[in-house]
Image (cartoon, rainbow, N blue to C red):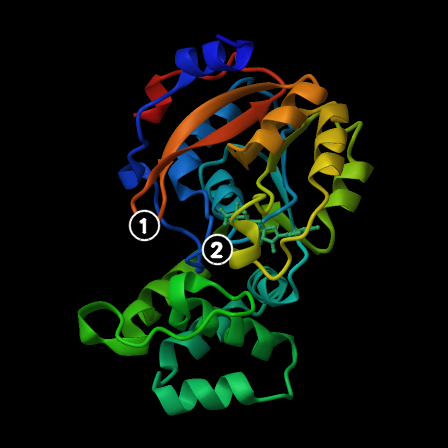
Amino acid sequence: MTMFDMDEQKTTQSIINVASVPQRSPFRYPGGKTWLIPTVRQWLKQERKIAKELIEPFAGGGIVSLTTAFEKLADHILMVEIDEEIAAVWEVILNGKNKWFAEKIYSYDLTLENVKAELENPNKDLQDIAFCTILKNRVFHGGILAKGSGMIKNGENGKGIASRWYPKTLRDRILAIDYVKDKINFISGDAFEVLGQNLNNKSAYFFIDPPYTIAGKRLYTHFNIDHEKLFELTAQLQGKFMLTYDDTPLIRQLVKKYNLQYRTIPMKTTLHIEKNEIIISDNFSWWTNKNNC
Ligand SMILES: C[S@@+](CC[C@H](N)C(=O)[O-])C[C@H]1O[C@@H](n2cnc3c(N)ncnc32)[C@H](O)[C@@H]1O
């Protein structure tokens, strides 16, 4: 038995129940980490400090940042996202246009013709891009915005493209973010740059959820990242970190090469296939079985 197998035997958990996780993001995010929130809570509570900062360099749907803000698990939050479509949503919500955005969604008449017209409109300012992104996220298969994705045809209960369009819920979630937005900064930019600038930031907690090595290409426009570089930077962080990955030979090899600690954790994919993911952290004193059931 290798060192890795032994570790795995000790640490494999039961599937997490996400009923205790309020849905706070306006996105239905492919590869989103709602299922990992109970574990993230435990990680953020590992030490009680007055000035704690969460840095989420691959923010995506932002469920970790939003939960952290609402549950006061950190005093300040920095979200970073490189995808301009996703970034537009966060910029509009966090920089004073959330009421406009909430009402635009709430009053929108979602028909196939209207959606097509909206998606084909070439003149787009930031607010239009944000609206279009949420629209696509709700009417495309699996919320996937990457090339090759297409509109839902039949949807749930024969409701077609509107089957994931919940205007009141979206409005309420967007308006609620107003209560925590003063704690959150958003950077439309590159995770690698922000990590590089924060290597010596000892009070930061880095939640790092990059596009995975296998599924990334299908799910994200920006999937092509330098995984080894990410390991190299992560290994230099002076703050606390949690790095999540798919369980593949490449990732296990990098864990070993950079001498990092890891645990495996089970999750169910949207196709209800059970598989393990890898959680890498600077320490595992915070890790318990309890928070995962
Ligand atoms: C796995 S997803 C994050 C999901 C997020 N944790 C959630 O729960 O919604 C990875 C995200 O990283 C973004 N991304 C890819 N390359 C990036 C880069 N260099 N800098 C910042 N974000 C990047 C992708 O656009 C995608 O939104």
**Which of 34 and 10 lies nearest the eye of the viewer?**
10
Q: Which residue is found at the position 32% from the left and 50% from the top?
A: 271
Which residue lies most toward the front here? Answer: 1
* Residue type, mark 1 in image: Leu
Image quarter for residue 226? Answer: top right
Q: Secondary structure at mark 2?
A: helix
> From what the image shows, is residue 115 above or below residue 86?
below
**Which of 142 and 95 lies nearest the eye of the viewer?**
142
The x and y percentages for residue 115 are: 43, 84
Quadrant location, the C terminus: top left
Q: Is residue 200 left or right of residue 163?
A: right
Q: Which mark is residue 281?
A: none
Q: Is residue 64 left or right of residue 14?
A: right
Of badges 1 and 2, the one in the foreground is 1
Which residue lies most toward the left here? Answer: 157
Measure the C-alpha gap from mark 1 to mark 2: 30 Å
Q: Any atom of ligand 1 within 8 Å of the CB at mark 2?
A: no
Q: Which residue is found at the position 59% from the left and 59% from the top?
A: 94
* Residue type, mark 2 in image: Ile
Image quarter for residue 187? Answer: bottom right
Q: Is residue 4 left or right of residue 169?
A: right
Q: Which mark is residue 271?
A: 1
Q: Which residue is found at the position 68% from the left and 57% from the top?
A: 82
* Crowd tier of the residue under label 2, counting other residues whose Cα lies within 10 Å: few below 14, some 14–19, many 20 or above: many
Image quarter for residue 55? Answer: top right
Task: Determine which residue is flagged by label 2.
Answer: 177
Disc on the earlier residue, 1 or 2: 2
**Which of 200 and 281 lies nearest the eye of the viewer?**
281
Q: Which residue is found at the position 33% from the left and 18% from the top?
A: 290
Q: Secondary structure at mark 1?
A: loop
